[in-house]
Every structure is written in structure tokens, then in C-alpha cells.
Amino acid sequence: MITKKGIDEIIRGYDVRKLTVCTLGSHSALQIAKGARDEGLANLLVCTKKNAAFYKDWPFVDEVLVVDSYKDVLSGKVQEKLRDRNAVIVPHGSFVEYVGAANILEGLDVPMLGSRIVLDWESDRKKQFKWLAEAGARLPREYKNPEDIDRLVIVKFPGARGGAGYFLAGDEKEYTRKMNSLDLPDGVKAGCMIQEYVVGTRFYPHFFYSPLDDSLQLLGMDIRYESNVDGLSRIPEAAGIEPSYVVTGNIPVVMRESLLPGLMDLGRNVVSASKKLFAPGMLGAFCLEMICTPELGFVCFEVSARIVAGTNAFINGSPYSSLLYDEPMSCGRRMCREIKEAAAKKRLSEVLY
Ligand code: ADP
């Protein structure tokens, strides 16, 4: 794994007047490329043959680099090209999923916005729970043994699978029956997490933490639109249909204002805990996945340590970002502004690793 010193060395060799914001053509790439254009930075999207034409068509996309597979971003040739362009990689969900957190840590020697150490924590549910617990967040109860299941639970499998294969169970018998009927490798089954199913309303707030002035911003908030669970309420007799949680879209939401102070405290605690656990900690965009109970408490079931796709609902700004900025400020644009401001202040090393 390239050291922080190694990345700093690369940054020192960069022409900071000619930085290029780079990401994979997927997930929130349009928002990021548009954000770069709005901030006066060049952008480059690494695309597969299949989607290159789609991304090339947008007027604000400067350059598309075509690869056979997204993993090719790890090849020496592509990395060299990116460094030649003074590239700063902005990782998003598909970037982490397609290239792989471990591969990024092991073999990507191009500066990335934020600290890459967080990828190790984000890609492991157990580490995520340790981090959220350190932040004092309330977590769903976790069951180590199926025989302890005493309420409705959701069973999740490793990796950012968009909820595919997840199932609900009310007791050990149901758990065993459903687990046995699943066509998944034993290794994947063994890595499952059995979590209390929390009933309430979901919120996915989008935060941005800047180490440049130690500020935490709330840039937006969404609810994931998930298939088929979000369609079940439309069927009067949905009992018997197994819900699934595959993300198919995102719906904008605002939170009751009296809940916002508590939300910001939680966001700050998540940043402080990250600094304690894996310095320099969580830098830049992140999202807490949470459920608000009828007692108005938050239960967090996941943290995404990067831009989330729900920010695509706010490419032109959100109700929250428009309170902070008098111009449209997407999360993608905010990240590009961070790069621009850090470069202007000669503090790039504080926001890149
Ligand atoms: P992934 O990271 O694979 O997308 P998540 O942990 O985000 O998986 O879970 C997928 C979806 O399942 C969530 O968006 C939410 O709708 C639902 N969910 C997850 N955990 C819980 C929970 N503990 N209680 C209630 N619903 C949950």
C-alpha cells in the first residue's frame, strides 16, 4: 500500500494549476464531472466501452478514458496517464464496488480525495459498527447465534450488494429455512450479519466534513427507493411475498427541523470517532444510514464513507445546501471546491490520500 508520504510526493510533482478530477463513469459521475466544470477544474471519466458514448455526450465532460474493465484503473499504464493529468480521484460507491477496497488500498498510486484508510473501515460491517459505537450512535441489536433471535431480524451478506439476497426472519426456524433455500456460496453465508429489524422511517443524510476549517455541513438527505420492499405497500395482500432491498432510485426528503441538532451532533461524533480510530479519520463526503423511531431516536445501521448516489437527487442543490450557499452546490461540486480551495491554500496534502 502506498504510504501517505508516497502520495504527498506525487502531489508535490503535480502542476496544481492543472488538476484533473477523475472518477469512474458510473454512480454519481455526472454530478462530479459537472461539479468540476462549475469549479473550473478539468474532469476525466474512466469508462468501459459499453458506457463511454453515454458519458461523452454530456457537454461538461472533458475527457473519457476507455478501458476494458473498471479494474483496469489499477493498471500501470492507466495510473501513469492519470498522474500525467495531475489527477485527483474522487471515489464513489461503484468505484469502491468495482475496483474493490482492498485493491484500491494495495495498488492505486494516484491521489484520492479523502483518506483511503477509511475504505478499510467502510468495507467491513464489523468495523463500521465499532466506529458507529465509538461515536455513541444507537445501533440495531446484532445476533451472533440464530438461536438467540427473539424478534424480527434482517439478515445481510458481505459487500455492498445493494440489498440483494437479504431476508427477514422472526425466529431461528424461519432463519434456517430461508438460509438453506438461498443459492449463495457457503463462505458468503458464513459472513452474514443478523440484525434487529428496526421499524421506523429511514433517512440517509449527506454530510461533508472539511479538515481545512474543521467544519461539518449537511448537504442533503434522501430515502433509498428499494425494490420490491417499497412496492409491497401497494398490494393489499402482500403477506407471503418476501421483501428484497435492491436500490433502484432515491427520493429527496427533509427531516423535522427539531431533529436536526441531534443529527448534526451525531455527524460530528462520527467524525471525532473516526479521528480516534483511524487518523486522520473521515474526510469529505459521508452518509449515515439510519432509522428514526416513533420515540424520535436515531438507529444507525450503516455508514458510507464517500459520496452516495442519493446526492444525485440534488445536482442543482438541496434545501440544506441552499441554506449554506447562494449557488447550486451538489455534493460533487462541494468535493471539487474542496480540491480547489486546498490547492489555492497549498494544503492539498491535508485533503488527499
Ligand atoms: P447494503 O449496504 O447492501 O445496501 P444496507 O445495510 O444498506 O445494505 O441495507 C439495505 C436496506 O435494508 C436498507 O436501505 C434498509 O431499507 C433496510 N435495512 C437495513 N438494515 C435495517 C435494519 N436494521 N432495520 C430495518 N431496515 C433495515
Image (tube, rainbow, N blue to C red):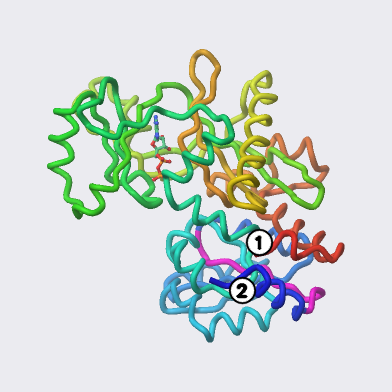
Quick check: 224 above or below 93? above
Q: Horizontal placement of 215 versus 126: left or right?
A: right
Residue placed under numbered mark 2 in the picture: 110
> Which corner quadrant of the image does residue 29 belong to?
bottom right
Label placed on residue 113: 1
- Tell me, yes or no, whether the highlighted magenta stretch contains residue 136: no
Number of residues whose C-alpha sits closer than 10 Å to that of mark 1, classed few (under 14), some (14–19) or many (20 or more): many
Which quadrant, please, contains the C terminus?
bottom right
Quick check: 273 above or below 101? above
Please name the amino acid that badge 2 sits on: Val
Measured as percent of width and height from the top left, residue 256 is found at 63, 21
The part of the chain drawn in magenta is 15-26
Quick check: 100 above or below 299? below
Q: Is residue 258 visible?
A: yes
Task: Identify which residue, 270 or 209, lies in the foreground.
Answer: 270
Which quadrant of the picture is home to ligand 1?
A: top left
Extreme-top residue of the structure:
295
Extreme-bottom residue of the structure:
77
What element does badge 2 sit on? loop
The span from disc 1 to disc 2 (Cα, nearest Å) is 10 Å
The residue lying at 73 percent from left, 64 percent from top is 37
**For disc 2, does the CB lie below 8 Å from ligand 1?**
no
Q: Is residue 29 visible?
A: no
The residue lying at 49 percent from left, 56 percent from top is 120
> Which corner quadrant of the image does residue 17 belong to?
bottom right
- Tell me, yes or no, whether the highlighted magenta stretch contains residue 19: yes
Number of residues whose C-alpha sits closer than 10 Å to that of mark 2, classed few (under 14), some (14–19) or many (20 or more): many
Quick check: 297 above or below 145? above
Measured as percent of width and height from the top left, residue 322 is found at 76, 39
Measured as percent of width and height from the top left, residue 303 is found at 52, 42
Q: Horizontal placement of 23 versus 9: left or right?
A: left
Please name the amino acid that badge 1 sits on: Leu
